[in-house]
Amino acid sequence: MTTDGLQDVRWKQRFVHFRKAFVLLEQTMTIEHPSDAERAGLIQFFEMAFELSWKVLKDYLEEEGFTVQSPRDTLKQAFQAGLLENGHVWMEALKDRNLTVHTYEEKIAIAVEQKIRDAYFPALLTLFQTFEAKLG
């Protein structure tokens, strides 16, 4: 058992970290008109939550007997296994995660922020709720 009382299962351990990143993103989402620094924070929290989300999925799928390597493979398999809805949103999020290194360009930062608010955060929220339920 881990100190959290969770079984020593990799996806459960990783989910604890995802939960922390997700909560930070969720808190930042409440800022309606963020400053440049707040927008950068929102994008950073999205990056952290997204990175941990696909790793939770990877660990879970591996425990279920699947072999996945890359984020793309993981997201495709998770969609096929019914763990994700809107597979195209997840693939778009993966693509945009790679754009976030350009958040110093205000136009890109604003566009990514809008996608996070409109599509990526709701997708992460659904995943968060799915795995919270799996922890029971």
Image: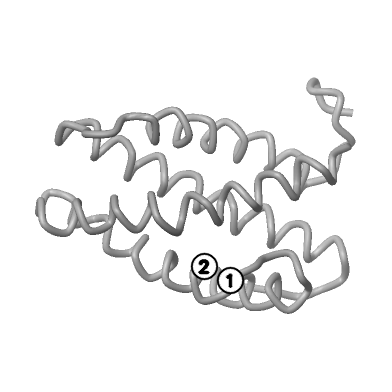
Residue lying farthest to the top in this orientation:
3
For the point 89% across and 35% down, the residue is 7
What x and y, as percent, mark residue 122?
A: 52, 52
Name the quadrant of the C terminus: top right
Q: Using the image, determine if residue 49 lies above or below residue 65.
A: above
The residue tagged with tag 1: helix, strand or loop?
A: loop
Say above or below: 30 vs 134: above
Say which of 115 and 2 sits in front.
115
Q: Residue 77 appears in which quarter of the rendering?
A: bottom right
Q: Residue at x 61, y 71 (%)?
A: 75
Name the image colouring: one colour
Q: Look at the numbered discs 1 and 2 and tell me whether their residues touch, using CB distance below 8 Å.
A: yes
Q: Mark 2 is on which residue type? A: Trp
Question: Where 31 sits versus 78, above or below?
Answer: above
Given residues 86 and 98, the one toward you in this image is: 86
Quick check: 43 left or right of 61? left
| Disc 2 packing (10 Å; few <14; some 14–19; many ≥20) | many
Question: Quick check: 105 left or right of 99?
Answer: left
Q: For the N terminus, give its image quadrant.
A: top right
Q: Residues within 10 Å of mark 1 (few under 14, many from 20)?
A: few
The numbered mark at residue 90 is 2
Q: Amino acid at mark 1?
A: Asn
Q: Position of residue 134 (x, y in %)?
A: 84, 46
Kindly state the secondary structure of the residue where label 2 is placed.
Answer: helix
Which residue is more in the foreground, 19 or 116? 116
Q: Which mark is residue 59?
A: none
The residue singled out by tag 1 in the image is: 86
The answer to whether residue 11 is left or right of residue 94 is right
